Image (cartoon, grey):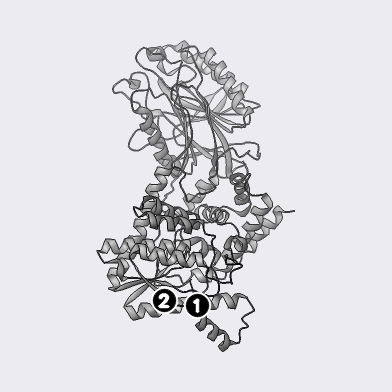
Amino acid sequence: MFDGFLKVVAMTPKGRVADCEYNRIQICKMIDEAAENGAKIVVFPELCITGYTCGDLFWQEYLLEEAKHELHKILFHSREKDCLIFVGLPWEKDGKLYNVAAAVCKGKLLGLVPKKNLPNYAEFYEARNFTPGNEAVEWIEYEGNPIPFGMKQIFSCREMEGLRVAAEICEDLWVPAPPSISHTAAGATVIVNLSASDECTGKKEYRETLIAGQSARLLCAYIYANAGEGESTTDLVFAGQNVIAENGTVLSKAENYEQSSVYAILDLNRLRSERRRITTFQTDNTGYEKIAFSLEMKEEKLDRFFDPSPFVPHDQKIRDRRCEEILTIQALGLKKRLEHTHCQSAVVGISGGLDSTLALLVTAKAFDMLGISRDHILSVTMPCFGTTDRTYTNACEMTRRLGAVLKEVDIKNAVHQHFSDIGQDFENHDVTFENSQARERTQVLMDIANQTGGMVIGTGDMSELALGWATYNGDHMSMYGVNASVPKTLVRHLVRYYADACEDRALADILYDVLDTPVSPELLPPKDGEIAQKTEDLVGPYELHDFFLYYILRFGYEPAKIYRIAKKAFEGVYEKETILKWLKTFYRRFFAQQFKRSCLPDGPKVGTVALSPRGDLRMPSDACARLWLDQLEELEE
């Protein structure tokens, strides 16, 4: 339960219709299993104590009394179980019968939530037996204790601020305005659904989509427990399709007809972060009763999967679609800017590295969209002290294969003159030695753009911007930055996608070699003709930094939690000491280098995380990182 993680389960007992004692025994066995597995919320199907398909047997008073009697035994059985349990049963109140979800915790009946929407069409005829539940909560007596009865109940955990649970029942989800809408507006982060949804062709996929979509719209977790084998098959079959979703993602699901329990680890802090971020998420707790319960705080074993490449889909078909979409967004952004400024040319500094390669590919795509010949693209290579034959050759050949115009400007003499002017020792390979080259290249590009009535296309990517790995007013500056919101791990896949889809095999081979080239700014002299300066040796692996970037900006996670999930995501790849080292580096650089991001050129947003000071990141340039770094220091103690 630390860091907002919570284990939950949706369970489907194999029951018997109208045999309350048998059903209670199965339910209690499954409660034991859930508790042993560490589940803190346990959800059973609709009317599971009696069975959903009792039909007119629901009018039998003895069945109703037996259901209450078995609920009492479930309460007794739950006394030593550290979990919140939801079971379904029929409940008579004021001469009317209701289909209710009973919330149970540690031997106590916390509340009864009635079903509001009773289907009475096709195979359903619930209105024959039941009365729609009221939203307003009233208090009834059960075994001498006052119990809330009504839909507007939020079950709130005293020990975990983000754990607020509300219930709806089966059809409640399928209507245009489900109760879960008002539940989440009132603060519920977890919705449980006790369901008895029969099976027919195509319903499984629709049901899963409905559950995932509701969790996305309401920024909540959704636990759906469905009836299964054991219900009457007079007319229907129930498949036990249990689903657990969180903010649009299905975390766990049962295959139809398997009658299996479905566990998942929820991330409640992630949901709270989303709600804070999305200001259109409205709140209104009018008329709601807050029912408190307690759970023991324990650290959850992280069985949940954390993608080590959160910016890159693993499924190749999805990844290919995403790559095509991103390339199109980048090109459309540039197309509009070129049209608006009436540019006669586009100027790209081409190094033979990944970022400039992607920028050139995007520029070519934008020119194709405009119907302008690619010979209006000036691809400028500017060899200097660190340029290797490999990157130089790739830059030149790539330009030719794409149909752009290659222009070479050797900047060695200009930089030597600059060193002489400012008194820089050539043998002193410090930051001045490096940045002088970067700024000279930017000056060359800007002046060529002026000469040709053109625009300098920026090449720097989002990962470099996050780390500040750019020379201020050097490669940091351009007239339009097409890669500004593309992380380094995704740049690689975009280039590979282009190469795979390219009909020009010679161009594809060049792109594959670019992909195999170590990432480097090439600002230090080569060693034996090979790249001497490898970026990831200096600032750390980009796959780690992109992982950090995603969870820091997308969900606002604190450092300790990011460290914890990074250890899980990169288990067997990086030692924990390595992860902690580079996480500290990320925070230090991210805060210290904001001044570079505060004056970024324009560039298109392509994903959910971006660093534009005009859009996604309004951060002061002199913010202090102490709070975050102090927490990381404590992890070493």
Looking at the rendered structure, the number of numbered marks drawn on it comes to: 2
Q: Mark 2 points at which residue?
A: 445
Q: In the picture provided, is 198 more to the left or to the right than 291?
A: left
- Residue 167 sits above or below residue 527 on the image: above
Q: Decide: few, some or many residues near mark 1? Use Cα within 10 Å; few <14, some 14-19, many ≥20.
A: some
Residue at the spot x=35%, y=80% of the render?
A: 450
Q: Decide: few, some or many residues near mark 2? Use Cα within 10 Å; few <14, some 14-19, many ≥20.
A: many
Question: What amino acid does circle 2 point to?
Answer: Leu
Q: In which quarter of the image is residue 174?
A: top left
Residue at the spot x=57%, y=75% of the render?
A: 434
- Residue 497 sits above or below residue 84 on the image: below
Question: What amino acid does circle 1 point to?
Answer: Arg
Image quadrant occupied by the N terminus: top right
**Front-lying residue, 290 or 453:** 453
Mark 2: secondary structure: helix
**Marks 2 & 1, CB-CB < 8 Å contact:** no
Residue 399 is marked as none
Q: Looking at the picture, how far across and down is residue 256, in whole percent?
A: 43, 24
Of the residues under marks 2 and 1, which one precedes in the sequence? 1
Q: Mark 1 points at which residue?
A: 439
Q: How far is the residue under mark 2 from the one under mark 1? A: 10 Å
**Front-lying residue, 268 or 57:** 268
Asked whether the viewer can see residue 482, the reply is no
Q: Looking at the picture, how far across and down is residue 419, in whole percent?
A: 57, 84
Residue at the spot x=50%, y=18% of the render?
A: 49
Q: Looking at the picture, how far across and down is residue 635, in whole percent?
A: 70, 53
Q: Quadrant of residue 394?
A: bottom left
- Residue 534 sits above or below residue 277 on the image: below
Q: In the picture provided, is 69 more to the left or to the right than 36?
A: left
- Residue 29 sits above or below residue 433 on the image: above
Asked whether the viewer can see residue 399, the reply is yes
From this viewpoint, which residue is outermost toward the left? 371
